[in-house]
Amino acid sequence: MASTHRGGGVSRKLALAGRRLRAMNAQHRSRSAPAIVLLLTVGLLVAACGTAATPGPTGTVILTLTAGPVCPVERFPPDPNCAPRPVADAEVIVLTADGREVARPRSDAAGKIRLTLPQGRYIIRPVQTNTFPSAPEEVTVDIGSTPIDVALGYDTGIR
């Protein structure tokens, strides 16, 4: 029986497939080259930035904002209904000793603001709104390892 198989037909197909594969690889390399360059560039930029500075020790300051007086006449013994009221949603500006702003927190419903900051000297500046109560003067605080409480008294204007 005579074979109908042509000599070299399989090898021609393999050679053609090999050329196609090499062409595809070359095309893939040329497309991925810009991506590789971009990834290397980003990696170098991130490495050049270095690591973030490790923050030093922190401290806590707890601000209590109250408004008073709330009654026109002080009584003795004091009337509990005339106790100063919390100042909710009041904004304060926190500045470093050299005047750089580091925070702008707002008081909660109880008139409290709790801040954790790097230890050091800060200026607490209450922001005045267009209405009463009048904001108190700014205060300077030294934040250390022990939490500190600072009372900020807003003036209602009641006399």
Image (cartoon, grey):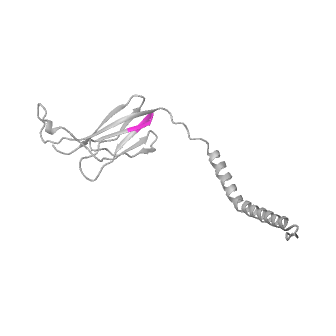
Locate residue 45, reporting x and y percent.
64, 49
Q: Nearer the viewer, residue 72 or 32?
A: 32
Q: Is residue 58 left or right of residue 3?
A: left
The magenta region covers: 115-122
Residue at the far front: name it: 1
Residue at screen point 14% across, 39% down = 81
Residue at screen point 88% across, 67% down = 7
Locate residue 106, reporting x and y percent.
34, 46
Q: Is residue 19 magenta?
A: no
Q: Is residue 148 left or right of residue 71?
A: right
- Residue 77, quarter of the rendered image: top left
Number of numbered discs: 0
Task: State which quarter of the image contains the N terminus.
Answer: bottom right
- Residue 82, quarter of the rendered image: top left
Main SS of the magenta part reads strand
Q: Is residue 117 magenta?
A: yes
Q: Nearer the viewer, residue 83 or 2?
A: 2
Locate residue 93, reporting x and y percent.
38, 45
**In the depicted structure, whether residue 3 falls above or below residue 39:** below
